[in-house]
Image (tube, grey):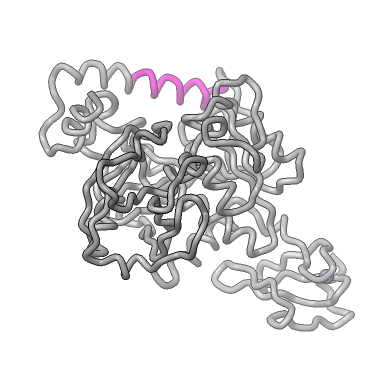
Amino acid sequence: MERWLQQVWYGGRPAPWLLRPLAMLFGLLVSLRRWAFAAGLLPTRHPGCPVIVVGNLTVGGTGKTPLTIWLVQALQQLGLRPGVVLRGHGGSLARLPAPTRVTAGQTAAETGDEALLIAGRTGCAVAVGRDRVAAARLLRQQGVQLVLADDGLQHLRLARDLELVVIDGERGFGNGWLLPAGPLREPLSRLQQVPLRVQNGGERLWCSDALRMQVGGEQLCRVDGQGAAEPLAAWRGREVHAVAAIGNPQRFFDLLTAAGLSIRPHVWPDHHPFSAADLAFADALPVLMTEKDAVKCRAYAQAHHWTLPVEARFEAGEGRRLLGRVLMEARLLDLLVCPLCKGPLIYDKSAAELLCRADRLAFPIRDGIPVMLEEEARAVAADDPRLER
Ligand code: ZN
């Protein structure tokens, strides 16, 4: 069924007549729901700290998780404490009415694969639950300064300060139809209402002002966490089993093929709960899996099970542009503190500086991004009138 739908959505043929009335009905319900939230008939809730939503318009993987990890790490480098809320697909905690903070001892069977991956890679606070408002409030109570909602574009109850949409550059919007005739969860017109658009890979630009992102990785790691990493380039010409239970497995397979590996692909449904038997092949070839799958297989991983950690990458200047816009449009500058005394900062917009009164220092803001380094700051005269504010 899933494979047939993928063929219908991305096969390059018109949507089947049978599914079109259902897509129209779905479109009507989506519009009604949006209207009800906009008109205040359905209430929205704000957790009381800035909320940034990272989402997509289509079903399946577009590269949201690598972008979320990139954003969290960029914000952490500025001294901020971001947290991430997500549904926790594939985990048992997603079914509970109350949200749960992800902790070190939990398994992907509880938290879902994406939550465990984000928590492991960034060390930031992560909460899962079907009520994203409650999850965001939980994190805020625990000291998080701002919340990123991974896959929250359609979770309208959560009021947001900024929306980002990730576009799958390889597959675009398929046949352009709404579910179930096509892969769209919302009409394409929604794209124009989202302030920040990021396209992951692909040659053709699907949206004229989208920032371009690539997802890549160079180092292979053992799933059991033992042994040393090996450069992917050193595996050129090797034959491997490639296992993927993600939204767009072809993206992973293409990455390995482009690196010169000879792969035997094995596709599982997104969020598939792996067992040891799923990875037992008749031969002794290495088994390579995505990072999202690796977090589910650690407990029974063997020495020939490998994973390729990936990261989001931007062309020169594009990443800075994205971060600068996130800081400005979600009003995150107010959250920054002085790296020396941890005290509050005064934001001087016209001079593009952040001032610390206690240390009499001005930290520059370059291309919209504060440079929170003592060696980059300049001294401010004691009688500078800006310090009086
Ligand atoms: Zn200071």
Kindly tell me whether residue 311 is visible in this rendering. no
Q: Is residue 258 left or right of residue 16?
A: right
Q: Quadrant of residue 93 in the image?
A: top right
The one nearer the camera, 20 or 243, is 243
Residue 133, horizontal then vertical, whole percent? 63, 30
* Residue 32 colored in magenta in the image: yes
Residue 350, horizontal then vertical, whole percent? 66, 70
Quarter of image, ligand 1: bottom right
Identify the residue at horizontal 59%, vertical 43% (top origin).
84
Identify the residue at horizontal 67%, vertical 59% (top origin).
333
Identify the residue at horizontal 64%, vertical 59% (top origin).
76
Q: Is residue 60 left or right of residue 86?
A: left
Q: Quadrant of residue 102 in the image?
A: top right
Q: Which image quarter is the N terminus in?
A: top left
Residue 185, horizontal then vertical, whole percent? 35, 30
Q: Which residues are magenta?
A: 28-40
* Residue 94 colored in magenta in the image: no
Q: In the picture shown, does residue 385 fall above or below 5?
A: below
Main SS of residues in magenta: helix
Kindly tell me whether residue 284 is visible in this rendering. yes
Q: Is residue 215 left or right of residue 256?
A: right
Q: In the picture shown, does residue 337 fall above or below 177?
A: below
Count the marks: 0
